[in-house]
Image: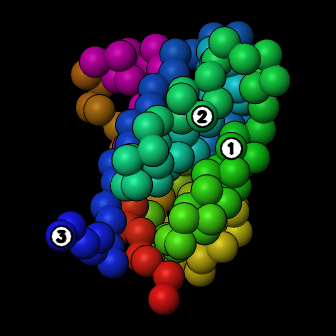
Amino acid sequence: MQTTLPLRIGIGYDVHAFGEGDHVMLGGVRVAHSKGLQAHSDGDVLLHAICDALLGALALGDIGKHFPPSDPQWKDVDSRMLLRAVQALLQERGWRVGNVDSVVVCERPKLAPHIDAMRAAIAEDLRVDTGDVAVKATTSERLGFTGREEGIAAQAVVTLIARQ
């Protein structure tokens, strides 16, 4: 007989290339920048990584399975809406978020002034305390595509707890 543990862990990763624009969306926050991100949605790599981590924790596939870029209804969608939809899926299946740990990798824009707002937006959408959401920012020391300022990457790890 197989039993389900009351705890699940998921990991997510996303990346988008820079393109034309005057801002990027990260963690649900508009951050002024000399470039935008190329994407079917608003390109919020941080929220996309968190969505993938949440979906992966329950073996429900990835963000592309639930919100395919081939579907015009997701064109330019606010990624906070996607995160709220994923949170609703978790809740329907009897799970809640324990915590989120995430990191955004880019040389620019500088994210430190926006981290608290990102944490607050993510916590609100996942219905958890801000203290349960970590958002960190780092550079890649000018190495790779993020170091050459060609795009932004994000990783996230989440824990899910079974509702009693």
Three-letter code, disc 3: Met
162 relative to 25, above or below = below
Region of the chain picked out in magenta, as a range: 144-157
Kindly check if marks 1 and 3 are in contact, taking CB atoms under 8 A apart as contact.
no
Circle nearer the viewer, 2 or 1: 2
Q: Is residue 164 visible?
A: yes
Residue 99 x, y percent position in the rendering? 43, 71
Residue 146 belongs to magenta span: yes
| Label disc, if present, on residue 38 of the rendered structure | none
Q: Circle 2 sits on which residue?
A: 66
Circle nearer the viewer, 3 or 2: 3
Residue placed most toward the observer, 104 or 111: 104
SS at mark 3 in the image: loop
Kindly check if marks 2 and 1 are in contact, taking CB atoms under 8 A apart as contact.
yes
Residue 54 x, y percent position in the rendering? 46, 53
Residue 89 x, y percent position in the rendering? 61, 56
Residue placed most toward the observer, 24 or 66: 66
* Residue positioned most to the front: 1
Three-letter code, disc 2: His
Q: Is residue 137 visible?
A: no
Three-letter code, disc 1: Leu
What coloring was used for the rendering?
A: rainbow
Label 1 to label 3: alpha-carbon separation: 35 Å
Q: Circle 1 sits on which residue?
A: 82
Residue 162 belongs to magenta span: no
Q: Circle 3 sits on which residue?
A: 1
Circle nearer the viewer, 1 or 3: 3
Give residue 10's quadrant in the image: bottom left
Locate the N terminus and report the quarter of the image it occupies: bottom left
Label 3 to label 2: alpha-carbon separation: 30 Å
Q: Earlier in the sequence, mark 1 or mark 3?
A: 3
